Amino acid sequence: RPGDILPSASVASGNRRILRGVLSSFALEEAVELARAVAVEVAGPEAARTDREARWPEAALRALMNAGLGGLVLPRSVGGHGLGLRALAQVCETIAEQCASTALCFGMHQVAAAVLAAKATPAQRDTYLVPIAAGRHLTTLSLSEPGTGAQFWLPQTTLATLDGGYEVTGTKSFVTNGSHADSYVVSTVAADPDAPPGMFSAVVAPADTPGMRWVGDWSGVGMRGNSSRTLELDHVRLPADSLLGEQGDQIWYVFEVVAPYFLIAMAGTYLGVAASSLTLARDHLLAERHDHTGRVLAANSILQHRLGELYAYVERTRRLVYQAGWEADANSVDALPMLASAKAEVAACAVDVTNEAMTLAGGIAYRECSPLERNLRDARAAHVMAPTTDVLRVWAGRALLGLPLLGE
């Protein structure tokens, strides 16, 4: 419901029935209601503990998968629901209103699922897509590396042909759902020794593959439940069918699949953080009153004005995100600058709105472990998560000028 600034206070009994009985296919509105049911009943009550203990939100993610949302963006031919980027944005927003870490983990699963589906072989379809759609398999991306910074599309992880298969060696950083997913989409240098410089490939590695080692625990300032860990791949042996698409397809995957799905999933997630902060600020103004006058804070015209400004900020950002999803679903020529701008605008919106909501709420919001304090820490990740806001602004400008995204 685009006009709402308040999440549902309770979940209707009809939604609970839907949650227990997974639908074979559903429309956008049903997907959002399912997500809201899980978010309110499972993710929300555990959000503070997820943050405090840096605990991966397993219960919420499993509930989302069991509710049939794991295959949200997968084609119906494999049991998915065939919903697009607009749906992904709304579902991630709905989850993030209750727990941003859960939304981030869920969004990364959806991005990786879209990558696996883009050029899936029959074997990959049966091994990965069908179980994902059935809620039995969680996947994620492993693209970033310590030495390439925000330029995650330039992997240094090597891929060598060996005994009819492949051998992968390298280190991946900030792997969301790290050590908890059932499979990992890994970017590498192309294996063909005659491949020109800058040719990269992508493979999928099951979680139980020998040679994969997790290093350190995730301890971030915010998004503390996402288990964003470092993965070391030490001469990891993979069968030939682990290659996604053809050798050299990694750049295609990054800009045709990863970029749109990732940007919209993250835009939806941080939009949910902004919406949550707006709701918390409104609730505070309605509930608190001055003892010496007996008047609620909501009666103060200055505070009314400031809340109205925040509402407009969230709503215009929401419209941009939703429209970007629609444009991408329609393969519009305007999709690229809109997607890049959507994530950049949401990053600013989430930080600004949460910061101002904390000011409106006063000292009570500045306490450690308050919901607004958690939102502020979670929101700040939006600017530094690659592609960073600065990179996205450049991409939008280059797209508008008809220039290659990665040019000088």
Image (tube, grey):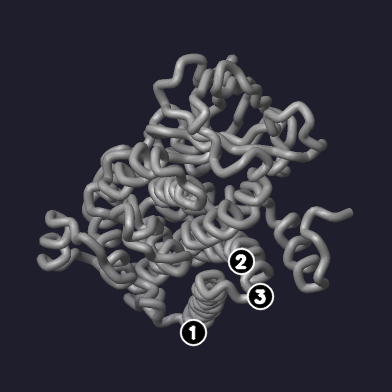
State the image coordinates of residue 334 (x, y, percent, origin top left). Answer: 65, 75
The reply to whether dot 3 and dot 1 touch (C-beta < 8 Å) is no
The answer to which of marks 1 and 2 sits earlier in the sequence is: 1
Q: Which residue is mark 1?
A: 301
The answer to which of marks 3 and 1 sits earlier in the sequence is: 1
Horizontal side of residue 98 vs 37, given as left or right? right
State the image coordinates of residue 130 (x, y, percent, origin top left). Answer: 31, 46
Whether residue 143 is visible to the viewer of this picture, yes or no, is: no
**What's the amino acid at mark 2?**
Leu
Q: Is residue 129 above or below residue 275?
A: above
Labels 3, 2: front one: 3
Q: Who's the residue at 46% across and 31% down the image? A: 178
**What's the amino acid at mark 1?**
Ser
Element under label 2? helix
Camera-nearest residue between 339 and 132? 132
State the image coordinates of residue 56 (x, y, percent, origin top left). Answer: 38, 35
